[in-house]
Every structure is written in C-alpha cells, then in structure tokens.
Amino acid sequence: MKKLDDVIRDRREDGEERLLEVARFAEQGMSAAAIIHEIRQPLTALSMALQMALDISQTCHSEMQDIVKEAIRLSGRAELLLERGRDFMTPHKERVEIQILDAVDRVMSMFHWHVRTVENISIRQHLPADLPHIFGDRGQIEQAIGNLLSNAIDALSNNGGGTIHVVARSTAEQRIEIIVADDGVGIPPDARAQVFAPFFSTKPRMQGTGLGLYLVRHMARAHGGDARLLTDEELQQLALGPLSTGILIALAQGMPSGSEGEGR
C-alpha cells in the first residue's frame, strides 16, 4: 500500500503534467487568435477599398485606379500574413535597417481609405526628419504601429470623431519612441492596468479580439523595447492640445542583444 507522501507526489506530478498539456493547448489557441486578429485588419481595409471602388467607378477613372491598386496591395499583405501564420508570434530571424518615417508612411497609406470613410477624424504627424535608423522586422514594426492607429480610429469613430497624433522621437538611451495619442473619451481608470493583457478589450462586444495591444507589447519587447500607456502628465508634456489616451512604443536603435527573444 502506498504511503501518503507517495500518493501526494503522484497526484502532484499528474496535476503538473495536465497543467502543461492545458498550457500547450492555450498557447496554440493564443497563436491562432493572434493570426485571426492580424489578418482581420488588412482584410477590413481591403473590403472598404473595394466598396469605394464600386461607388466611384463610373465617376472618376483615375481615382478608381488608385483604389484598386491599394486593394491589390492589401490583399497581398493578407496573403503574406497567412504564409507567416505558423511563426507569427515569434520574431523573424531576418533583421533589416528600418527608417521609422518610411514605416509610418506605409502604415498611413494602408489606413488612407479607412480614415476617408469615417467622418470628423484627422491624423497629424510629428516626425522629425533626422530620426536614427533601427534594425528589426519591418512587418512586425509596421503592424504594431497599425494596431495603435486602428485602435485610435475605432475609439474616435465610436464617439463622434476627433484628432489622432503620431509622434516619433529619439532618446538619450539610444531608443526610438513612437507615440499614438488621441483626444477621445479615454480608457476607464479601472481598465488601464489590463490593456496589454491578452483577450482584454474595452471595445463593444464582437468588435475587438483583445489582442491588439498584447501584440504591440510583444513586438516591442522582441525589438529590445517595451510598450506602455502615457500618464496624464506625459500627455500634457507633448503640448499637442487636450489628449485623453496615448500609447508609447520604445524600440532599441541597434540590434537587440542576445537572441531573438523578448528584450527584457
């Protein structure tokens, strides 16, 4: 007959194995949900672009061509995300030199038609021309900026419009900081501590997956930095008028030390 200590040890080992199995399934589910989130963004923009093409096809041929070109580019981006689906949650091995101004321009071009379909929303850029380059995964950095911009647009479109500010700056700590801020209703105080948690969302039900900011922080840490909410004092120091919400991404200027894991 087994001693009590042996029974307890066996039960503990069995419980630990079951916990590891649950964790493996949870990790797979997290990756699948992340892929869905990232595919949804370009496909939504693609749908809007094609709808606009239908609306104006008989009145403005040149503008029609621009929209169709944008639709083709977005569909190609969606296909790329599908190809990268299996390893999306891990950083790409290939790191290239990236100019943040170019990355922001590419993201802004993706949201050009999206913003045009929403009334009373404007986007202002505050990007110095002499920003240092960084090394990283271009797709992940652009996706992080896009997630922040998408969140801001959604927040303002649900509350009558407003202004979004995109700010970039370098720091004495050899980092590039990118800030996306808006003058909407803001994040409820009791939700601020949870905004980067997976599957947490302040959006209406069925509108958000709760993974956008989680992925932003994951990407930032993979590039030797981090992501966080700005305090009210920090928003005032931007001197851009009344602002309610601001999220900052910090990225290392050089190649993150160590392997391609998270940068902290």
Image (tube, rainbow, N blue to C red):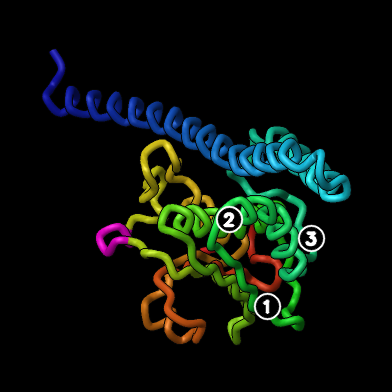
Instruction: State how far apart marks 2 and 1 are (Cα).
Output: 21 Å
Q: Amino acid at mark 2?
A: Met
Front residue (pair 170, 101): 101
- Where disc 2 sits, the SS reads helix
Left or right of residue 237: residue 67:
right
Q: Earlier in the sequence, mark 2 or mark 1?
A: 1
Which disc number belongs to residue 96?
3
Crowding around mark 1 (Cα neighbors within 10 Å: few <14, some 14 to 19, many 20+) is some
Which mark, by number, is residue 219?
2
SS of the residue under disc 1: loop
Asked where in the image residue 185 lies, by quadrant, the reply is bottom left
Q: Amino acid at mark 3?
A: Val
Magenta range: 188-193
Q: Which residue is mark 1?
A: 127
Spot the residue most to the top.
1
How far apart are the alpha carbons under marks 2 and 3? 15 Å
* Amino acid type at image mark 1: Leu
Residue sitting at 64 percent across and 33 percent down?
86
Residue 57 pos. (x, y %) = 80, 39
> Which x, y percent locates residue 167?
60, 75
Q: Earlier in the sequence, mark 2 or mark 3?
A: 3
Q: Nearer the viewer, mark 3 or mark 1?
A: 1
248 part of magenta stretch = no
Where does residue 88 sit, x and y in percent of width and height?
A: 63, 41
Vertical position of residue 120 compared to residue 60: above or below: below
